[in-house]
Image (cartoon, helix red, strand yellow):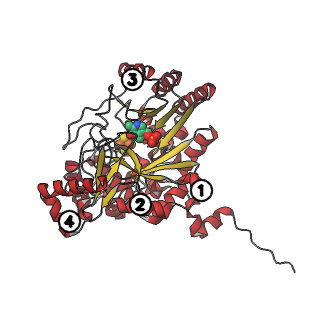
Amino acid sequence: MVETHKVESINELNKKLPELEHRNFRDDDFWKSIPAWSQVTREEFGDHLWQQKNSIRKIDQVKKVLGDLATPELMADMEDGQRKTPMNIRITPYIFSLIDWKNAWDDPLRKQFLPLGSQFLPEHPQHMSDSLSEDEDSPVSMLTHRYPDKVLFLPTTLCPVYCSYCTRSRIIGGSTESVDKSSYGANQKKWDEVFDYLRKSPLVEDVVISGGDSFMLTAAQLKYIGESLLKIPHIRRIRYATKGIAIFPMKITSDNAWFEALKDVHKYGLSLGKQVVVHTHFSCPKEITHWSQLAMEKLFRAGIIVRNQAVLQHGVNNDVSDMVLLTRQVGYLNIQPYYVYMHDMVPGCEHFRTTLREGIELEKAVRGTTAGFHTPTFVCDLPGGGGKRHVASYEYYDEENGISVWKAPYVKPGEVFTYVDPIHRLSPEAQKRWQDPETAKKMIADAIAKAKD
Ligand SMILES: *Cc1c(COP(=O)(O)O)cnc(C)c1O
Ligand code: SF4
């Protein structure tokens, strides 16, 4: 008698093998665990207008939507967080309902968007609101021109979510209890001044359209910006930056006008022999689901290349298995992992930052786990505007005091830059040394002198 073997479906197989974990994309009705959304259908949940309308903008809404899941301790801690954070609240129902509210304290998504007061740490004395000196290298409003052939264009300061760790917390998302900001929305007249500047800058080939977030541009604005830039003869590449694919994939799958506008700009680019790509921002495996897969299938079939930039964050993705999983997951979705950034030295983020050493160790662990072109480069964007450098390319690293010294020979010849590790991660003696401004100054000067040797 011939034995018949049951052929397992590929999905069943994927679920059983831990090394294939990156192919399992959550597809349950997870939002139904949120009391206010227990009756919301899949169709409603998948509608970008529903997502936008039901985005959480205030602590009161958190409480209302969560009902019994909102414990008084958690709510008090979150309210305290709002007094300390430089960022306002905005969070899509999609991300909100992926948070494990029974264990909110530890949840990597809650940490990114709804900070708890008790988790903040005192600022590092070296922190800076414009850590990357973007304003200093700005020849015209909304534009940073630091590298000869590429520029950073910030057409809006609005985003579909507000990340507690935003590097542009000085301008993004409106004033908070702790920071006054001059945020701005779409302003075509100002954009035209940027295009004028770029027309007169023949070395520029590459434009990053960031912000803020390209998801907040209307279809017409997206198209206007894209086409205006592509028409400039020396511009060869544009990238739309959006965290949207990670935190609001329903916009790709259901906002047809917006998606068509993106496709049109992409096609227009092709007709001119120019690149139009999207850069996105997945931080951790928990925010990747079947909805991400649907959005990416649509983008990939349209021929639009997507790359990922993540920020290294303590308690979110600074763990080897999470970082490897994230890398393999986004690779599987046809997203190229591009950069993992050391956390910038911006205010309100000391609890998120990691040591440079951790960045270097994670880079070692991730390399080799998948295709080389799907392996992110771990970089430190140098405070003071030296640009992005590979994490292991420092000139000198005083690990005891957490001071690394860097050079950026092409971007700022002759200058040195320092990056500092979070103080709470140093030895008690080193922590004490940082308490005294004179000692701290000397430690930095010593490290710089060593780097110059
Ligand atoms: C990051 C950045 C760019 C783009 O740099 P890539 O390394 O090419 O991604 C351009 N301009 C500024 C000011 C930047 O910070
Ligand atoms: S989406 Fe980007 S720009 Fe907007 S708040 Fe988050 S990190 Fe900042």
Q: Secondary structure at mark 1?
A: loop
User: Which residue was labeled with disc 4?
Assistant: 430
Q: Secondary structure at mark 4?
A: helix
Amino acid beneath label 4: Ala
Q: Earlier in the sequence, mark 1 or mark 4?
A: 1
User: Which residue was labeled with disc 3?
Assistant: 194
Residue 399 quadrant? bottom left
Indicate the position of residue 271 as horizontal and vertical percent values: 63, 25
Is 50 or 271 nearer to us in this picture? 271
Instruction: Look at discs 3 and 4 and give the one toward the viewer.
Output: 4
Instruction: Look at discs 2 and 3 and give the one toward the viewer.
Output: 2
Amino acid beneath label 1: Ala
* Residue 35 vertical position relative to residue 387 in the rendered view, above or below: below
Q: CB at mark 2 closer than 8 A to ligand 1?
A: no
**The N terminus lies in quadrant:** bottom right
Q: Earlier in the sequence, mark 2 or mark 3?
A: 3
Indicate the position of residue 173 as horizontal and vertical percent values: 30, 38
Instruction: Look at discs 1 and 2 and give the one toward the viewer.
Output: 2
Q: Secondary structure at mark 3?
A: helix
- The circle on residue 422 is none
